[in-house]
Image (cartoon, rainbow, N blue to C red):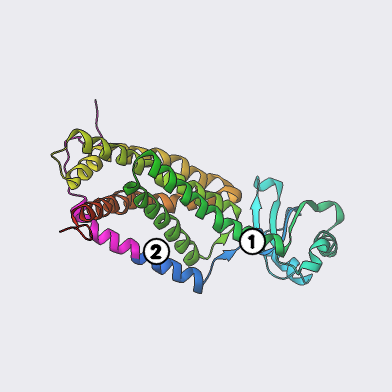
Amino acid sequence: MIHLIKPSINIDFLGKSKPFVVASTIAALLSIVALFTKGLNYGIDFTGGAEVQVKVPATWDTSKIRTVLESGGLGEASVVQIGEPQDHEFLLKLQRPAEKLSLVSAELEDVFKKNAEAKTFEIVRVDVVGPQAGANLRSSAVLSIFYAAIGILIYIAIRFDFKYAPGVVRALLVDVIITLGIWVMLQKEFNLTVLAGLLTLAGYSCNDTIVIYDRIRDYSKTHSDWTIEQAINRSINQNLGRTFLTVICTLFVVVSIWLLGGPVLSDFGLTLLIGMAISVFSTIFVANPMVLYMEKRRLAKLKAPVAGVR
């Protein structure tokens, strides 16, 4: 059998985890600061606006479309080419006042008529999201991630032991928060596709951690003479090959989505790509040290003298 990493490898991951724990904590805190100061670049899914798919004359490109829209008083818009180049189809995202959202189709029709012949363009689809609906989606996005974390916390506590649950949730939150922080710095549009990527990341983040936790629990039962540090380090080392194989195989799919998925799926792929890179480190260097901390805390409570007993 060919092994990507030899099963006999023995690296002291817990001994090397402190810098990673500190770095991830600082990165998460900076990401939270960035979220509250610079803020996410919300798309129309969360702010309200109109998303329009149009077919334009063959000679038009994105700069020409932006010029036409600005000349018609529609302001700046996000313009992305979709489909095959020969289709000349573009996706326009327009920020409009709530009272004018219902008029977007008619306004675009008038603007295009002034700059092109009637049969050379077509408004294929118009989707409108009101400001109130966008605000509701923002709060739902936060709650969905919160409920996912709570659900995973309960599952791990029941499936394994409560001492394992905080490590999984901490690693999950680190992955999601730092990914959001990077999204803020990139100032890429945050929309429902990116939110779907974050929720997918929350599930992926737990995958390898749970396998390692299962091994830690088994070693704790079968090797009662081992310390918890030995059980954790051995479990991580034995799962290294599986961890990297999982990451490599998943990367093939995620990179393909990012590069070939087009404007609709590329942000989803990029979200997962960033989150997966963070998850590799958080699984090993954030989730497992938390188990050690919880176990030491439990043992300290057992050794502490009971009040009133001498």
Q: Residue at x 37, y 65 (%)?
A: 27
**Left/right of residue 179 with respect to residue 88 in the rendered view:** left
Q: Residues at badges 2 and 1 in contact (C-beta under 8 Å)?
A: no
Work out whether 54 lies above or below 157: below
Where are the magenta residues, as a range? 1-25
11 relative position to 52: left or right: left
10 falls in the magenta region: yes
Q: Of marks 2 and 1, which one's residue comes earlier in the chain?
A: 2
Viewer-nearest residue: 297 or 135: 297
Q: Disc 2 versus disc 1: distance between alpha carbons?
A: 23 Å
Image mark for residue 46: 1
Identify residue type, mark 2.
Ala
Say which mark, if any, is on residue 240. Answer: none
Where does residue 40 sit, x and y in percent of width and height?
54, 66
Q: Count neighbours of disc 2 (C-alpha within 10 A) and say few if under 14, some if 14 to 19, many if 20 or more.
A: many
Q: Residues within 10 Å of mark 1 (few under 14, many from 20)?
A: many
Q: Secondary structure at mark 1?
A: helix
Q: Residue furthest left?
A: 225
- Residue 28, disc: 2
Relative depth, front residue between 41 and 143: 143
What amino acid is found at the position of numbered circle 1 in the picture? Phe
Which of the image's four quarters has the N terminus? top left
Given residues 256 and 173, the one toward you in this image is 173
For the point 64% across and 58% down, the residue is: 137
Q: Is residue 277 magenta?
A: no
